[in-house]
Amino acid sequence: MKKEGDPMKAPKSFYVCSECDYRSAKWMGKCPGCGAWNTMQEQQEAQPEVQKAPSKRLGLVSSLTQDSEAVLFDTLELPEYMRSDTGLSELDRVLGGGLVLGSVVLLSGEPGIGKSTLLLQICDALGQSKKVLYVSGEESQGQLKLRAKRLGVSGPNLYLCIETDVRRIMAQCDKVHPDILIVDSIQTMYSEDIASTPGSVTQVKETAMALIHKAKNEGISVLLVGHVNKEGSIAGPKVLEHMVDAVLYFEGERQQSYRIIRAIKNRYGSTNEIGVFEMTDRGLLQVENPSEMLLSGRPEDVSGNCTLCVMEGTRPLLAEVQALVSHTVFPAPRRSSSGIDYNRMALLLAVLEKRLGLRFSASDAYLNVVGGLRIDEPAADLAVCIALISSIKDKPVGPHVVAIGEVGLAGEVRAVSYIDQRVRECMRLGFTKILLPKRSAEMLREKPRGVELVPVGSIFETLKLFV
């Protein structure tokens, strides 16, 4: 018991890693627990009068859970999960066919990329037949109404709540009984029983856990908006991505109109699926044929351009990669890549210089994937190499050529998967010449008609294109 006249003790500060929960009395640039940089966040130590908080925290979650008993696995029945169409076929594709009843989806992306716009459009579609509760912790009612009017959102079953206290949100759910709950954003939510600021590791984990239990016990589909940090990953604890059922990333450059939603985790569908949208003054418009969009406006008879074909989930996607190689007078040549991993670009440059004797070490090299698309699949290696060779030799490849294949350190071109789907997509878009690995050419189930297939065993064989 504090004696009268004693000075009030200031709360002590400590630092917690947002990735692994490592605690330290002082700030450190590198976390000793997981080795991540700049992840230590300051938190305040709980005051003595808040020592009862742990029991209340447990009550926050336990009140939402139901007692369960262990059952024999063989006696379980296979559930039939109901899906709700979001009104956006591209988003349904990413989710695996729609929003699953009782699922929790985390949507993340850069500020201003279009997350809130997408959610309002979902509200407009789902609000026609289902109850939707939109909880905002960042905008006022007037601001949301203004944006909704611009987008033409007017769902008859759409409810709006401006709140950040998770207990009050639960009370609103008990009052409205929504089918869909949207929380924008999880970093603004907090519980009064937790002695830390909103957005801290503890607050994010506890409030997310409470919302997840609410979703599972009452069959509410929950959409959570998550902010990203300066490294581009979701802000807050890494465990948040493990807690939810699906994680969607909103990608794209704010200077460009195209946006891509990518699934990196999905318990009810395939991963790495993408949906393509175009940002307009009327909101996000679906791009149902992204390959045609990405290849529109291609220059002809210009060196440094090549078309690639990658698989995004179950969808073959064609895009244009551009390379620019120019001589430099500086001792350290410049390297820049957009849409291609920088380290992958450096590796391919080293392979071309070592195996083909091309002098990239005396030239600046720039790579760009048109449309703001980010390519991670190794099947794009062959097209990247051909674009670089075309640029340094200043000889165009041709507008009707597609290159597919992974390039190894020895310069060999390795086989890729889904070769039949890739070839069919190239034929559909009118390409007449396809460079592909020799092993993949042998694995083709049907030989396509009207298309010249050029099997390639090594990167050296691509030089005949520029003779």
Image (cartoon, helix red, strand yellow):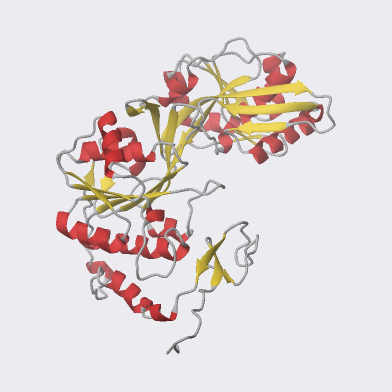
Residue at 27% across / 40% down in the picture? 142
Residue at 79% across / 33% down in the picture? 354
Residue at 42% across / 70% down in the picture? 195
Nearer to the camera, 263 or 308: 263
Which residue, as the protein is rendered here, is positioned at the far front? 5
Residue at 27% across / 43% down in the picture? 141
Q: Would residue 27 be seen by someone viewing this image from the given angle?
A: yes
The image quarter containing residue 277 is: top left
Q: Would residue 88 be seen by someone viewing this image from the given angle?
A: no
- Tell me: 406 left or right of 53: right
Nearer to the camera, 395 or 442: 395
Q: Position of residue 38 (x, y in %)?
A: 61, 56
State which quarter of the image contains the N terminus. Answer: bottom left
- Tell me: 337 left or right of 296: right
Q: Position of residue 343 (x, y in %)?
A: 67, 41
The image quarter containing residue 402 is: top right
Q: Position of residue 427 (x, y in %)?
A: 45, 19
Q: Position of residue 13 (x, y in %)?
A: 54, 70
